[in-house]
Structures are given as C-alpha cells and as structure tokens.
Image (cartoon, helix red, strand yellow):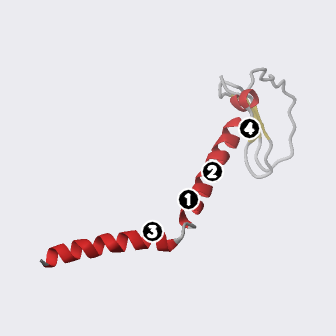
Amino acid sequence: MGAALVRCASTGESGFITPTGKFVTRLPVQQDAHALVRVPLNRRQTIYALIGDAPLLIFCSIVVVTASLKLSLLSLPVTLMSGRSSACSEARFRSQEA
C-alpha cells in the first residue's frame, strides 16, 4: 500500500488521491475551489529511516580509497616502470633478429 497524496496545482488537476490510487476529491481546473479531506498518516518507516546514511558513507569511502590507490600508483617513479619494460622489449627484439 502506498501513501496518500494531496495535490494542489494552479494550472492542473487538484485533489486527494487515496493510498490505493483512487481520486476521492477532484477540484475544477483554473477555478478557485477548496476541499476538506481526511488524510491517513503512514506509520511505517521507510528504508532510509531504518538505515540512514550508512550505504552512502560506505560507497563514498570505497570511492575515495580506490581513487587514492590509483593516484598513488600513478605517482610511482617512471624510471622504475619504464626501465624494466624497455629492457625486456630490447631482449625480445634482439632474439627475433637472430
């Protein structure tokens, strides 16, 4: 079951919709009108009310840690990484020539 909806619009349909989706009260479009309705309160708690910001905080923490690791890997000295790979490629190139 959903929640009740009270819609007030100056340019569209206004009225009251029950939690089951039925229009109980409709007010005319582009005319001054008023209605008095009883709106049932929803006593159930939402998922957000139960768990709060925990999933968002966990996700943000994972993003920050992942970004930090990637940045730290990118800041490694280039000579260490390129020196080893170029020696390997030279050895392969020489073995292909022979």
Query: Which is nearer the N-term, disc 2 or disc 1?
Result: 2
Q: Residue furthest left?
A: 98
60 with respect to 25 (left or right)? left
Which residue matches tag 2?
Answer: 65
- Per the model, the C-alpha gap separating discs 2 and 4 is 18 Å
The quarter of the image holding the N terminus is top right
Nearer mark to the viewer, of 4 and 3: 3
- Per the model, the C-alpha gap separating discs 2 and 1 is 9 Å
Nearer mark to the viewer, of 4 and 1: 1
61 with respect to 76 (left or right)? right
Q: What amino acid type is highlighted by mark number 3?
A: Met
Nearer mark to the viewer, of 2 and 4: 2
Residue neighbourhood size for the residue with mark 4, other residues' Cα within 10 Å, grouped as few (<14), some (14–19), many (≥20): few
Query: From the viewer's perspective, is residue 60 above or below residue 83?
Result: above
Residue neighbourhood size for the residue with mark 3, other residues' Cα within 10 Å, grouped as few (<14), some (14–19), many (≥20): few
- Per the model, the C-alpha gap separating discs 4 and 1 is 26 Å
Residue 25: tell me if it is visible.
Answer: no
Query: Which is nearer the N-term, disc 3 or disc 2?
Result: 2
Residue 89: tell me if it is visible.
Answer: yes
Nearer mark to the viewer, of 3 and 2: 3
Q: Quadrant of residue 22?
A: top right
- Per the model, the C-alpha gap separating discs 3 and 2 is 23 Å
Which residue matches tag 3?
Answer: 81
Q: Which mark is residue 53?
A: 4
